[in-house]
Amino acid sequence: MPERPRIRLVPLAASLAVFALVLRAVHALPDTATGLSAEMTAGAKASGIKNVVTAVLLDFRGYDTLLEIAVLMLATIAVLSLRTDPDALSRRISGVAGPVLGALTRAYVPIMIVVAGHLVWIGSSGPGGAFQGGAVLGAAGILLALSGFARPRWSSGAPMRWVLAVGLLTFIAVALLPLALGGTLLQYPDESRKSLVLLVEILLTLSIGASLTSLFLASASDTSEGERR
Amino acid sequence: MNVVHHLPALLVITPLVGACVAFVAGRRVAPHVALATATADVVLAVLFAARVLAEGPFRYRIGGWGAPMGIDLVADGMAALFIVLTSIVGLVVTVYASGYFRSTDPTAYGHGLFWTLWLFMWTSLNGLFLTGDVFNVYVCIELVGISAVALVTISGGPDALRAGMRYLFASMLGAMTYLLGVALLYASAGAVDMATLSERLVPDTTAATGLALMVAALVLKTALVPAHFWLPTAHASAPTPVSAALSALVVKGSYFVVLRLMLDVMPDGYLPGAATLLGVLGAAAIVWGSVQALVQTRIKLLVAYSTVAQIGYLFLVFPLARNGRDVLALALTGALVHATAHGLAKGGLFLAAGGLITRFGHDRLAEMRGAARAVPVLTFAVALSGVTMMGLPPSGGFAAKWLLISAALTSGEWWWAVVLVVGGLLAAAYMFRLVAILIADAPAETAPAPKPVRTEWLPLALTAAAVLLLFAVPLISDLAAASTTLQSAGVTP
Amino acid sequence: MTTYDVYVAGGAVLFALGTYGLLERSHLVHKVIAANFMGSGIFLVLIGLANRTPTPEPDPVPQAMVLTGIVVTVAMTALGLAIVKRYFSETGRTTLDADEKPGERR
């Protein structure tokens, strides 16, 4: 039965109140503010990472990003914990797709991998980075699974678990490395900062791609009772 | 490398590594990984508390940048207390869970992913207690939220899924509102580091709105009445070790951030009325939660509503804190003792309730009459937790109420003392009702225990610790004195 | 009024719409989408506010916050949809409202 359109008072009041509050708060702001941009820009220049946003994400506030990767991995694991039947999707997709989809997949996936690599590489100087690359890689993974080249049940096998974890584990290892050199967590040594950031980005891309693929496959995996009812 | 210098970082990284290893290693090895991680975390937590007690609060500059550019961890007595509490309850829950999840079908309970999710939750709690950065708080509360929801839904039953769904929506609403608050706060003050913010904050509309949104969001996450709607079902329908962790620890996580924001970040008189409002809601929570606990017919819901009531006490600190540093010291110490006592007692009570449910095969209170004969240890654990909920000496609950009542009377705001006394009486009512059912002179119809359960002693250990907490009050008092709040107020131990 | 005020105002509208949807809608998927509205609203507000710098380059901190926020929102959304799906497969229902046992409300 379709929901009847209706207006409820409490949600309406809450949403109008929050709208008014935000507008009032933003209106009260002065027209310009520098925030932390001056410090951050100077710091990024000194560190050799030209894209300031990348420098903020992986260097100045690298700890946020470390935990954010943990959030993504945690969500993937949470979704995996909710599966009912890991093999259901495998049964629905039997064999490699027909000639058109098969040929397109063969053509597209290598290109997508190259694009993902490119996005990671340019991330240090322009828009791009591990998440952007990981998103493209994740799309490639889903394409491979849907067209029958990769088995969906791989989404929970031991090799996949390694790929899911390798980004975060590498990030942690790189974060801990400075402790042995007398620094604090994530205090990259200046001479190897760029290469360490790049190493972390590359492995994060793999894990993020794997996470996104797993998220899709795990939640697509059961054609459920409810649908049959 | 000297481990002692890096304790704040290691307290977050250790459980995180544990979570990854437990995931990669698979379900057979995961429980051992979790036990090893839990043990390591207890050691780190104790070392950390010892260092804070010896040297006072210090900051750990991640990346060496230093706030406001980088993220600083704040190591102080308050953080140390919550981290030690988390490690103790966490270790007990881990041991309990290794028995609880072993006895069931291996494909149930999320394909053995409990251990990974649990270690993620531990990571996020330690992260939350240590962070000195309001945006990092956002990432941490999302980690707490997602791991908590996933642990509620892990059994996959319809009730658990429904409760988890509602919990997730509350989490989402809270997290989004919090982030909006951070955006406004940053726009106004140009920083997200708490210490920097407390220096830069001026009474302007934008910052005040941001902070109000953040506090409101955290209050929702702490389930303070009237934002408690999600808590009882979530805490009651989770697997028992998860219920214990949620009630004992998770609500304290967001509460901890409220403490930081209200007492450290905001200067006196900022957000006028907020402190009083939080106190009034706390009083309402004590009454409403207790009354609801009195009428519940299912044991875990009773315990969950008791959590709603006990959360109320924690918020009485805010109106009291405005009355000079002596009252602040009394009230804050009282709140910290209460949080510790409740963490231990409620963790134990949930584990005991879960044990009773396992033995009876159901959770209906009315049919648990006479349980004491069959399960004396669990019944005793329930009774001991009652001692601290009611606030009888020498329990932690007694010490906490004593400190809070002293604070109320010293400040002249005696009505908070009335709330505390009434709350104790109401707690006595619902705990007596529970204990009376268990020790009733009736033949108990328990299912035969599958085997003598070694985990029955664990709830008793926790509740006994809560009852004896009075003897640890000097220690908690020292930790409170080593908090950034009391140090900046000029209170010396 | 600058271009960026439009972003901020638009963000506030999205956030308010999302708040309404999350509280009012009962279909679970609608609620998840509403939460995403709230997220997008905040991201717009952040992007708008980041451009208040006197220099041509916007403030990188809110941009980094948006990137972090997007990932976190994706994670929450994925979990939300997975629970909705599992809930639907266990019960055949798409809402939480009805058939709650007494004593379990609230």
Image (cartoon, helix red, strand yellow):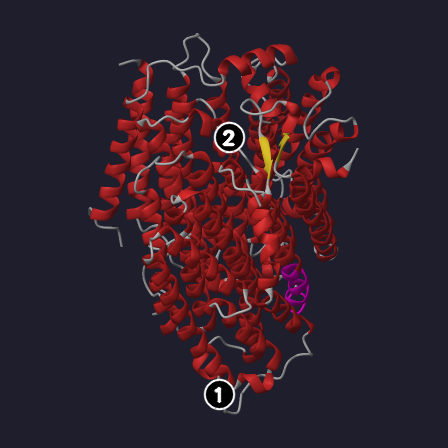
Q: Position of residue B226 (x, y in %)?
A: 33, 54
Q: C32 or B89: which is nearer to us?
A: B89
Residue under the image location 48 percent in, 87 percent down: B440
Determine if residue B477 is in view: yes
In the rendered view, tell whether residue A203 sits above or below residue B158.
above
Q: Is residue B204 left or right of residue A148?
A: left
Residue of label 1:
B440
Residue under the image location 30 percent in, 19 percent down: C5
| Extent of the magenta region | B92-105
Labels 2, 1: front one: 2
Chain at numbered mark 1: B
Prevalent SS, magenta region: helix
Where residue B8 sits, quadrant-wise, is top right
Where residue B371 sits, quadrant-wise, is bottom right
Q: Is residue B345 left or right of residue B215?
A: right
Element on which disc 1 rests? loop
Q: A108 or A137: which is nearer to us?
A: A137
Q: B382 or A95: which is nearer to us?
A: B382
Residue of label 2:
B195
Q: Is residue B228 left or right of residue A153?
A: left
For the N terminus of chain A, the image quarter is: bottom left
Where residue A101 sits, quadrant-wise, is top right
